[in-house]
Image (cartoon, rainbow, N blue to C red):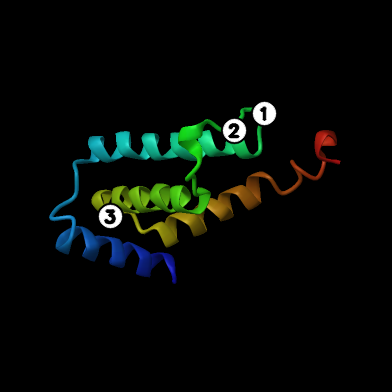
Amino acid sequence: MEIKQAQHLVDNWIKTTGVRYFNELTNTAILMEEVGEVARIMARQYGEQSFKKSDTEVNLADEMADVLFVLICLANQTGIDLTDALEKNLEKKSIRDADRHKSNEKLK
């Protein structure tokens, strides 16, 4: 699936199943909540925290998909074409960081 298709699918889902978009501020708060859920799993699965009994049903892929879903909602609401935005962002990074990481002693 391409990003543009994902934006269309999410928009269609919102308008048919979700009734309407939450406002942008609410979706921003939901995005932070979803990122926190990803962070909790990462800290326990790859970091030094241990899992709690309530964490037995964690699914990192599903939580990442939740983050992506809400991010797409915000992009749709604010008129952002994520394909275009990502292409421009990668171009910016490629120019800005052309030699930056190659010369970073910490990455060798």
Which percent across, then down, holds residue 8? 29, 66
| Residue at position x 18%, y 60% in the image | 17
Name the residue tied to disc 2. 43
Q: Quadrant of the N terminus?
A: bottom left
Q: State the residue position of label 3.
A: 76
- Label pair 1/2, CB-CB below 8 angstroms: yes
Mark 1 lies on residue: 48
Front-lying residue, 17 or 24:
17
Instruction: Tell me which residue sits at (66%, 33%) in the image.
Output: 47
Q: At label 1, which amino acid type do we have? A: Glu
Residue shown at 47%/49% (left/top)? 64
SS for tag 3?
A: helix
Q: Earlier in the sequence, mark 3 or mark 2?
A: 2
In terms of secondary structure, where does tag 1 sit? loop
Outermost residue on the left side: it is: 19
In the rendered image, the vertical position of residue 14 relative to residue 44, given as above or below:
below
Name which of mark 1 and mark 2 comes first in the sequence.
Answer: 2
Q: Position of residue 78 (x, y in %)?
A: 26, 48
Q: Type of residue at label 3?
A: Asn
Q: Nearer the viewer, residue 105 or 66?
A: 66
Q: Amino acid at mark 2?
A: Ala
Asked if residue 16 lies left or right of residue 86, the reply is left
Tally of numbered tags: 3
How crowded pointer 2 is (Cα within 10 Å; few <14, some 14-19, many 20+) is rated as: some
